[in-house]
Image (tube, rainbow, N blue to C red):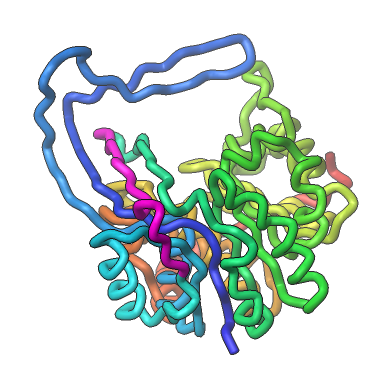
Amino acid sequence: MYDFITIGSATQDVFIQSDIASIVSVSQISKKSEFMSFPYGAKTEIADFTKALGGGAVNTATNLANLGLKTSTIIKLGNDELNDIIKLKLAKSGVDIKNIIDSDKHLTGFSIILVSFQGDRTVLAHRGANAHVSEKEVNFDAIKNSRWVYVSPLSGESNKILDKIAKFCEDNKINLALNAGTTALKKGANYFSKILKTAQIVLMNKEEAMLVTKMTIRQDTKENKFSKEKIHPDIVEMLKKLRGETKTIVVMTDGKNGVYCYDGKTIYVCPSFPATVTSTLGAGDAFASTFCASMDRFNWEIEKSLKFASVNSASVCTHFGAQEGFLTFDEIEKKLKAQAHFKVEKYPIEEF
């Protein structure tokens, strides 16, 4: 019996850091965007280079195993040298690898991560085998013997298994957490109607929430500063639209600004836990999987789960690599005790 099975992607991540990169801001009426840029046609020196294993399903499975949960993962790997490397790393991390799918037609996923001097990153991703997971390849017997299924972002054809997994979890009374990918989110809330109604927890970042709701956050309205001020009205409307009439707990991350969570009665606002940021890659996976594990451990206590997830996510930000810096529950609790002022604000939905 598993505590968690993660489903999603596995990649080889190559990190490239260059102090030459510029951050360019472009403003429009409805939004503001930032881009990382390099001199065109020039040879650019890099300040640092490293590589690590990544991918949503791998990152979350490794974190869940580190938290002491019996964990397996359903990923698809190519017929290449990365196949054995990823399996060995997962096994050493305590993740059961027997549900991994092998492909003889595709390469394992590969990403190049360009890290800015600010710690943020731009990812160049080749999905490879990750985009070709089919229903017949998924071990549903293993899923049936798990208390939780955590679905991380799927790409390409793999998105077709979402509804099948949602229905299977519903029929077999398995807790389902969804952290959907951009490819699927672009199709809007109607595309997710089944899984949004079925999942106990749905997690996404602010940009992804805007994609699925087809909403934007107006720049002419005062932003929330995570103090005594209330939440940006467009954030409130997005959270309400995402949850709809379901019983799903909706979690929306907003980078360094923190996290919003809505359970139908209360909107929770959790700031980022203090940390010196080296790289933000993997921080979202660490937050999402720690939140789900904490909800399971602490009897669905949202406020405590948000705190624990924020601490573990901040720890990952202090390292290069999406699987570096994971903390245990005991280590997280010690950090929270040392930062007794770290609080989650709560607003009854009636206030909006």
Left or right placement of residue 336 versus residue 323 in this view: right
**Viewer-proximal residue among 35 and 304:** 35
Q: Residue at x 43, y 22 (%)?
A: 34
Q: Is residue 156 magenta?
A: no
Picture coordinates of residue 144, whole percent (x, y): 68, 81
Q: Position of residue 38 (x, y in %)?
A: 23, 20
Q: Residue placed at 39% from the left, 52% from the top?
A: 106
Work out whether residue 124 or residue 290 is closer to the camera in this orientation and state it.
124
Is 279 situated above or below 87? above
Q: Please report the residue visible at 10 percent of the width from the left and 21 percent of the height from the top.
A: 43
Seen at 22% across and 53% down, the residue is 51
Residue 337 can be seen in this image = no
Split into 4 quadrants, where in the image is the C terminus? top right
Residue that protrudes farthest toward the top in the picture: 29
Q: Seen in the image, is 45 located left or right of residue 330?
A: left
Residue 335 coordinates in the image, percent (x, y): 40, 70
Left or right: residue 240 compared with residue 116? right
Residue range highlighted in magenta: 101-117
